[in-house]
Image (cartoon, helix red, strand yellow):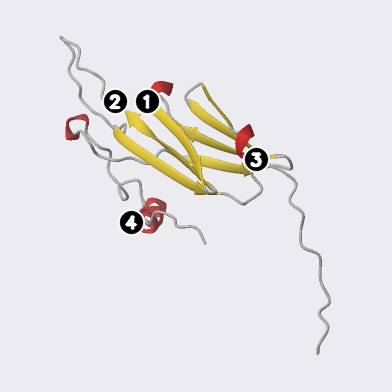
Amino acid sequence: MRLMRWEPFREMDDLLKGFSPLFGRLPTRPHEGDAEFVPPADVVERDKEYLVKVDLPDVHKDDVKVLFDDGVLTIKGERKIEKEVKGEKVHRTERYFGMFERSFALPDDVEVKGIRAESKDGVLIVTLPRVAVEKPRPLAITIQ
């Protein structure tokens, strides 16, 4: 049994986003500092591997940590607030800043030693190779 982080407002956010762009979480303003955001991710299963792709534009690879423990892949880091440039006025900010963390429970067929991560064009791609796991065969039990 694996534990997943419970985010009670995720289902409500998903429901409200379908009705109107005015609902759901509002963008975090840069001066709010430590507000948490959730970068969008795709999880793809292939014959020989799993791929996890996370959109992380403007996040430097040194500000991201990728961990795999007991079947759970965790990606965490921070998108830092851009410094104000003298002579510029910011009229609108809709991008999220601050700390983020995503966790994904994966099946037991991940080959831990072969996990790779790369950052390309603002997308973090984590490749998790699969190993062949022998499925248990049906076993006839003799009744005594």
Cα distance in 3D space between marks 3 and 2:
33 Å
Q: Distance between the residues labelled 3 and 4?
A: 33 Å
Residue 60 appears in the rendering? no
Q: Classify mark 2: residues with Cα within 10 Å, few (<14), some (14-19) or many (20+).
A: some
Counting from the top left corner in percent of width and height, residue 23 is at 31, 50
The residue under label 2 is: 80
The quadrant in which the C terminus is found is bottom right
Whole-angstrom CA distance, mark 1 to mark 4, is 26 Å
Q: Which of 26 and 49 is in front in this view?
A: 49
The residue that disc 4 covers is 9
The first of marks 2 and 1 along the sequence is 1
Q: Which amino acid does label 2 sit on?
A: Lys
> Which numbered disc, 3 or 4, marks the residue closer to the eye?
3
Q: In this view, does 61 lie above or below 42?
A: above
The residue tagged 3 is 111
Q: What element carries label 4?
A: loop
| Mark 4 and mark 2 residues within 8 Å of each other at the beta carbon | no
Q: In this view, does 70 lie above or below 137?
A: above
Report helix, strand or loop for mark 3. Answer: loop
